[in-house]
Image (cartoon, grey):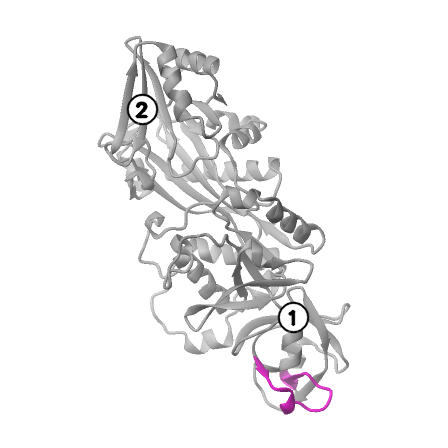
Amino acid sequence: MGHVRLFIQIVSERTFPQRANIIMSHSLANRLNLPSHPIWVTFGSSSDTALIHFSETNSPLIRISSRLASQLKLHGDIKTLNAHYDPPSRRLQLGPFFGVLLNRDVQGSEDQLFGDLSGFLEECARVATNRGIFLCIFPPEGIRPDQGLTQGWLWDNKRWQTCEGPLPDIIYNRITSRRVEKEPSVQQKLEKLRKEHQIKIFNESFLDKRQVHEILSKDESMKRFLPDTIPWNTSHLRAMVQRYRTVFLKPIHGSLGQGIIRVSLENNKWVCQYAKKTGTVTHIFPRFYEAIQKLRQKTSRSRYIIQKGLDLITIDGRSVDFRILAQRNSFGNWAITSSVARLANDSHIVSNLAKGGTLRKTAEVLSEAKVIGVKPTIFELRDTALAIANSFEKLAQGHYAELGIDLVLDQRGQLWLIELNSKPSKTIDTLPNTKLTVRPSVVRLIDYVTYCTGWTPYMSARKSPRARSKQKPSGRKK
C-alpha cells in the first residue's frame, strides 16, 4: 500500500484527455503503486471511479476534474492531502477528513467566529493542514447522514469559509451545551453516523459528577482518590455533616465552579457559603431546618451530590487544585499533555478561573506546599492522573480521547479526584504557556486523529511538500 502527501488542484473538464478525470505523474503513480486500469477514489464518505492519465512531469501535484471533485465534494483552491492506495479494494483514499462538531449558538464575532474556542480551532486547522488532513467544523444541523453531506466551515486563506462536504472519517464532539447534546435529533444523528456509517465519534458526551464517581468506584485501586460522595437529600446532608463537619454540595452537571455550596457545622450553627461575582456569600443558621430551606432554594434547578470536605493545602491562604490534561496519543495510549495549578481568588471558595482564580506552574506550587505526611512529586501527580484516565476508559461506556482531570492535595499529602471533564476548557487563559504558537494539546489531538483513522503508519515523520519547502530554521515549539 503506497502513501504520498500531495497537492490537489481542481480544474475544468476541458483540459483533460478523453475519459480521464485525474492527471498525475508516472513517478507519483509508482510511489502509490497505482495500476493503469480504473480504480475507486474516496474522500470521507464520497467515492467515484477514477480514470487516470499519466504525465511525464515529476510533481506532487495531481489534477482532478471539476466533475469528479463535485462527486467527491472537494472544493476550493489547491489542497494538501494524504493519499494511499489499497490494492485489494482498488481504492485510492484521500484524507483523512476530520470533523469537529460544535453547536451553532456558541457566542462568536466576525474575527472570533467560534467564541472562546476560536483560537484553539484555528490551531487545529493549521496543524491539520500542515499534515494533509482536511478539517471541517459543523453544527449538528449541518449533518445530513441520509444524504451523506455536511455543511460547515473550513480554514482557508487565514479565515473561516463556509463549505459543503461528505461525511467525515472521524468526529470530535466539542458541543458546549448539555441541552443541545441531549436533543433527540442530535442523538439520532450521532447514532446513525456510528452504526450506519461506521464513523468514529470521540468525547461523545458530557460527564456528570455522580456518574464519574460510580464508574471509578468499581475499581478498587481508584477508591483511595475518591472523596465520599452521595446524592443530596436532607437526611444525607445531616449524616455527612455530622461525620465530616464540612461538606460540599455540587451540581452533577456543574462547570466553572458554578453552583457549589459549602456547608459546615460550627459552634452548633449551620454555615452555608457559595460564590458570587462579588465574592463569597455566607449565611449562618441556628437551626438545621432553616439551613435546609435555603439549600432547597439554591439547589432547585439541578440535581446535586454531597461530597466530603477536605482539609486542603493552601498557598498564601488560597486553596489550590491541579488541572491535568490527559489525551490519547499517536499509539492510542493515554498520556499526560499538560498540568497546571489553579489558586482560588482570596474571596472565593473555589479555584476555578471563572471565579477569579489564577494559574501557576504545578512544580512551583508543589515545592511551596506544606504537608504533614510525604508530599507527592509532580511525577506522582501525573501518574495518578494517568491511572485515572486508564481506569475510566476501561470501565466507562463510550469513546473518549481527552479528559480534564482535577486533583487536589490535602494536608496529609493525599491526592483526591474532584472532577473529570470530557470537555476541558480551551480558552487561552487556561494555558500554562501562552507563548506557544500551537499548544501541545492540539498536536496530540491531531496525532490521535491520524491513529484512529488508520493513517499513522503512513504519516509519521512526514511533512507536506509546501511545509517542507517553506520551513525555516527557527526555534521549534514543544
Residue 19 found in image quarter? bottom right
Tell me if residue 314 can be seen: yes
- Where residue 368 sits: x, y (%)? 26, 35
The amino acid beneath tag 2 is Gln
Q: Residues within 10 Å of mark 2 (few under 14, many from 20)?
A: some
Expressed as whole percent of the image width and height from the top left, the position of residue 102 reads 50, 53
- Front: mark 1 or 2: 2
Tell me, yes or no, if residue 439 can be seen here: no
| Vertical relation: 412 (above or below) 78 | above
x, y percent for residue 361: 31, 44
- Element at badge 1? strand
| Quadrant location of the C terminus in the rendered image | bottom left
Q: Residue at x 55, y 39 (%)?
A: 390
| Residue pictured at 69% horizontal, 91% vertical | 17
Q: CA distance from mark 1 to mark 2?
A: 60 Å
Q: In which quarter of the view is residue 404 placed?
A: top left
Q: Which residue is mark 2?
A: 273
- Residue at 62% over, 48% down: 185
Judged from the image, the secondary structure of the residue bearing numbered disc 2 is: strand
Q: Please tell me which residue lies in front, 158 or 464.
A: 158
Asked if the magenta segment contains residue 123, the reply would be no
Q: Report the residue marked by disc 1.
A: 84
Left or right side of 360 for 68:
right
Q: Residue 58 falls in which quadrant of the image?
A: bottom right
Q: Which residues are magenta?
A: 9-27
Which amino acid is tagged 1?
Answer: His
